Amino acid sequence: DIQMTQSPSSVSASVGDRVTITCRASQGISNWLTWYQQKPGKAPNVLIYATSTLQSGVPSRFSGSGSGTDFTLTISSLQPEDFATYYCQQANSFPITFGQGTRLEIK
Amino acid sequence: QAVESGGGLVQPGGSLRLSCAASGFTVSSSFMSWVRQPPGQGPEWVGIISNTDTTQYADSVKGRFTISRDNSKNTLYLQMNSLRPDDTALYYCARYGSQTGLFDCWGQGTLVTVSS
């Protein structure tokens, strides 16, 4: 199975800050990497798929990059509604696996 | 979107069948998946059914869980047998994009608690 490791597990930041979250796969996954945002009591919501493609309706302050085993999600200027938990997920091979999550908190 | 139902409290070794009623898209022509999320933890993929009825499962549920669908009702099912306490989670159904690798059209989830 491909293990997905996110870092950091939590981060505190302020409105307007730039934040980067990293996801590392235990083996190469090409560009089969999706990022989700999850708020309490809600299902995960797609932000970025295929490593860097912005899902329709997602603000352009979110961006993704990477290839192979190392990937990043960047939020260029944090907004109040961005404080949530973020997950990466690989779909290169079954079983599909998720990272353990990064909790983004208000400083 | 999707609406899950059928969760509840069940004793270890028991069974439950979850349902996922879809709207706005056709279950029969989609790849559909179940994803669960234990309390306070990240999502865990459970299994998938393709548009040609091929199924795949996580090792943790293989042989115990079965995914099926009723095309006439546009509904997905998850039959769960031999339930264990570590199956306790919020269970979501979601559409899987085979060309994109993403899960969308998530439901609100249905909670399964396995406890004596």
Image (spheres, rainbow, N blue to C red):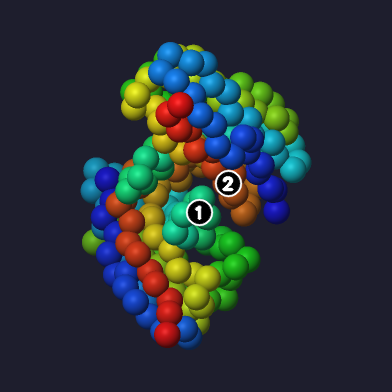
* Front residue of this view, candidates A78 and A38: A78
Using the image, determine if residue A18 lies above or below residue B75. above
The 10 Å Cα crowd at callout 1, few under 14, some 14 to 19, many 20 or more, is few
Which sits in the foreground, A84 or B101?
A84
Task: Say which amino acid is labelled 2.
Answer: Gln
Q: Residue at x 45, y 33 (%)?
A: A105
Q: Which residue is mark 1?
A: B41
Confirm whether residue A4 shows in the render: yes
Residue A51 image point, x, y percent: 58, 27
What chain does mark 1 sit on?
B
Q: Are marks 1 and 2 in contact (CB under 8 Å)?
A: yes
Secondary structure type for disc 1: loop
User: Where is residue B75, by image quadrant?
Assistant: bottom left
Where's residue A4, x and y in %? 65, 43
- Name the secondary structure under disc 2: loop
**View extreme (right): residue:** A27
